[in-house]
Image (spheres, rainbow, N blue to C red):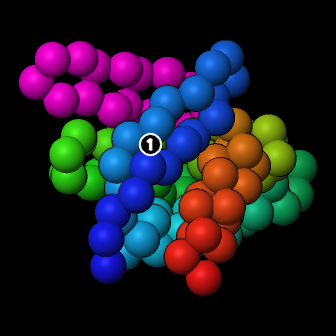
């Protein structure tokens, strides 16, 4: 499948880069696992010890290097969670936060275009 521009809406502004549908499906799977970890962290009962959840560390190298990181142990719910996003190549590096729910929407919109 061919690559196409993926636009991610950040807290302030957006970033667009070439991304493949296969990579988008990999990211979607990584986010689905993250959502399960976030739910596990959010559903803990007060006073009980819950085992820390593993962080999401997604990386993709294409025309640019793209990385998403999220520690599910610091967010009270999936709706509050933010991802640390890095997009870089040999000339520029962008590192910023993005809302998890917004990235999910952007990814679903991108994948619908290949429907």
Question: Residue 4 appears at what percent x and percent y?
Answer: 40, 58
Name the residue at 76% across, 63% down: 39
Disc 1 designates what residue? 69
Residue 85 part of the magenta-drawn span:
yes
Name the residue at 49% across, 30% down: 15
State which quarter of the image contains the N terminus.
Answer: bottom left
In this view, 67 is above or below 98: below
Q: Residue furthest bottom?
A: 115
Residue 97 part of the magenta-drawn span:
yes
The one nearer the camera, 27 or 13, is 13
- Relative to 89, is 98 on the left or the right? right
Is residue 87 in view? yes
Q: Which residues are magenta?
A: 83-98
Question: Residue 8 appears at what percent x and percent y?
Answer: 57, 40
* Residue 49, quarter of picture: bottom right
- Relative to 34, is 62 on the left or the right? left
Question: Residue 14 appears at what percent x and percent y?
Answer: 58, 27
The one nearer the camera, 63 or 30, is 63
Is residue 38 in view? no
- Please rate how many residues cluster around mark 1, counting C-alpha atoms within 10 Å: few if below 14, some from 14 to 19, many from 20: some
């Amino acid at each position: 499948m061919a690559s196409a521009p993926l636009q991610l809406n950040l807290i302030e502004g957006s970033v667009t880069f070439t991304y493949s549908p296969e990579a988008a499906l990999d990211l979607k799977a990584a986010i689905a696992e993250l959502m399960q970890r976030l739910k596990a962290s959010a559903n803990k009962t007060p006073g009980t010890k819950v085992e820390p959840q593993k962080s999401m560390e997604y990386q993709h190298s294409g025309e640019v290097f793209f990385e998403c990181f999220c520690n599910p142990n610091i967010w009270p719910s999936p709706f509050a969670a933010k991802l640390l996003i890095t997009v870089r190549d040999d000339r520029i590096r962008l590192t910023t936060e993005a809302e998890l729910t917004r990235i999910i929407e952007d990814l679903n919109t991108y994948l619908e275009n290949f429907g």
